[in-house]
Image (cartoon, rainbow, N blue to C red):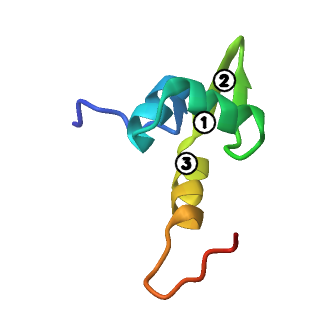
Amino acid sequence: MRDEVDRLTYTVTETARALGISRSYCYELVQQGVLPFLRLGRRRVVPRRALEDYVAQQTRRPGDVDPA
């Protein structure tokens, strides 16, 4: 049996750590709706799938044109 459970959600702090960004910037992304979240009681948590989708959307490939 596995010691670790596959988690479906992460706290904003854990999400920030996983992305390598500051906690405050991660809260900004959540507040702006860039990173979807769930409210569980008083906590905001980011679904694992939303985190994976965000990273996939932000990933650039060689030859991609910057939309700016």
Residue 46 numbered mark, or none: 1
* Type of the residue with mark 3: Leu
In which image quadrant can residue 9 be found?
top right
Rendered residue at 44%/43% (across/down) = 19
* Type of the residue with mark 1: Val
Q: Is residue 12 above or below residue 55?
A: above
Q: In which quadrant will I find the N terminus?
A: top left
Disc 1, disc 3: CB below 8 Å?
yes
Q: Position of residue 2 (x, y in %)?
A: 23, 36
Front in this rendered view, residue 38 or 34: 34
**Mark 1, secondary structure of its residue:** strand
Q: Position of residue 37 (x, y in %)?
A: 69, 36
**Mark 2, secondary structure of its residue:** strand
Left or right: residue 20 compared with residue 24: left
* Type of the residue with mark 2: Arg
Rendered residue at 73%/24% (across/down) = 39
Q: Position of residue 25 (x, y in %)?
A: 58, 32
Front in this rendered view, residue 3 or 25: 25
Disc 2, disc 1: CB below 8 Å?
yes
Left or right: residue 19 compared with residue 30: left
Q: Is tag 1's residue or tag 3's residue first in the polypeptide sequence?
A: 1
